[in-house]
Amino acid sequence: MSAKIGLISDLHAAVVPLREALTIFQGENVDLVLCAGDIAGYGTELNSCVELLLDRGARTILGNHDIWCLEDHDADLSEATKDFLGRLALTWKATLEGNRLLAVHASPPRSVSRGITLLDQYENILVEEKQRWALELAPYKLDVLIVGHTHQVFAEMLGQTLVINPGSTRFNHSCAVLRLPSREVQFFPLSGKTVRRVWHWGLMSGAERIM
C-alpha cells in the first residue's frame, strides 16, 4: 500500500495559486490535502479560499494569521469562514503507512509563531539550525513533521524526522506532494513562476512586494 498527501501552507487569502495547487493534487491523485495554516492574512480572498478548502475536504490547521483574523471583529468574513476558522485545531496527527506524522503551523508541540528556519536569504542550509532543531525534535519521535509559517521551502532530515515546509502558495509559489511509506517529497511551482525557496517581506524590493 502507499499514500499521497498534497501539502500547502500560508495561502494568505490568494485564491488563484490555491486553486492551481488543488488542480495539481487532483492530477497526482493524492489521498488527502493538508494545509499547514495561515489561510488568512495579506490578501482579500479569504472567503473564496475557505470555500475551496471545504469543497476539497482539506485537513487544515490554525496559523497565527487565522487567529488574528478571528480576533478582528471588523474582518469581512462570511459565516462559513467564521465557522471554518473557529473549528480549526492547532495540530493534526496521524499514522499513515507506518509513519508517525504531525502537522503544526510553526513548531511542536503547538506553536504558531516559533518557526523552523533552515535556510538563509541566499537559500543556503543553516547547518547550526539543522543541528539545533534535530536535538529539539528528537523527543517527539516523529517520522514526518509538516510545518509552514517561515515562507521557506524545504524537505530536510533533522535527526530521525523528515521536516517538510511546502512553502507559501502565494509568496513561494509552491506546493508539495509527500509519498508514503517512501517519504519522497516533490515540489511543484505555481502561477507560472519559479519556486522561491526563501521569501521574507524584509528581503523583497518594493516592486516585488506588490504580489
Image (cartoon, rainbow, N blue to C red):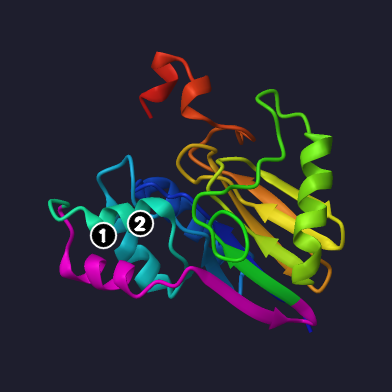
The reply, left or right, for residue 68 in relation to residue 5 is left
- Identify whether 151 is placed above or below 10: above
**Residue found 34% across the figure and 51% down from its top:** 40
Magenta range: 76-99
Query: Quick check: is 209 in the magenta stretch?
Result: no
- Where is residue 188? Give x, y as percent: 63, 47
- Residue 30 visible in the picture: yes
Which quadrant, please, contains the C terminus?
top left
| 73 or 151, nearer to the observer | 73
Which residue carries the number 1 mark?
Answer: 70
- Where is residue 126? Give x, y as percent: 78, 34
Density class for disc 2 (Cα within 10 Å; few <14, some 14-19, many ≥20) is many
- Where is residue 62? Give x, y as percent: 43, 63
User: Tag on residue 151?
Assistant: none
| 8 or 202, nearer to the observer | 202
The reply, left or right, for residue 179 in relation to residue 171 is right
Q: Is disc 2 in contact with disc 1, using a CB cutoff of under 8 Å? A: yes
Q: Place residue 96 in its image quadrant.
A: bottom right
Density class for disc 1 (Cα within 10 Å; few <14, some 14-19, many ≥20) is some
- At label 2, which amino acid type do we have? Asp
- At label 1, which amino acid type do we have? Leu
**Residue found 82% across the figure and 55% down from its top:** 135
- Distance between the alpha carbons at the discs numbered 2 and 1: 6 Å
Q: Secondary structure at mark 1?
A: helix
**Residue found 46% across the figure and 27% down from its top:** 201
The reply, left or right, for residue 68 in relation to residue 26 is left
Query: Quick check: is 96 in the magenta stretch?
Result: yes
Which residue carries the number 2 mark?
Answer: 66
Which quadrant, please, contains the N terminus?
bottom right
- Where is residue 98? Give x, y as percent: 80, 82
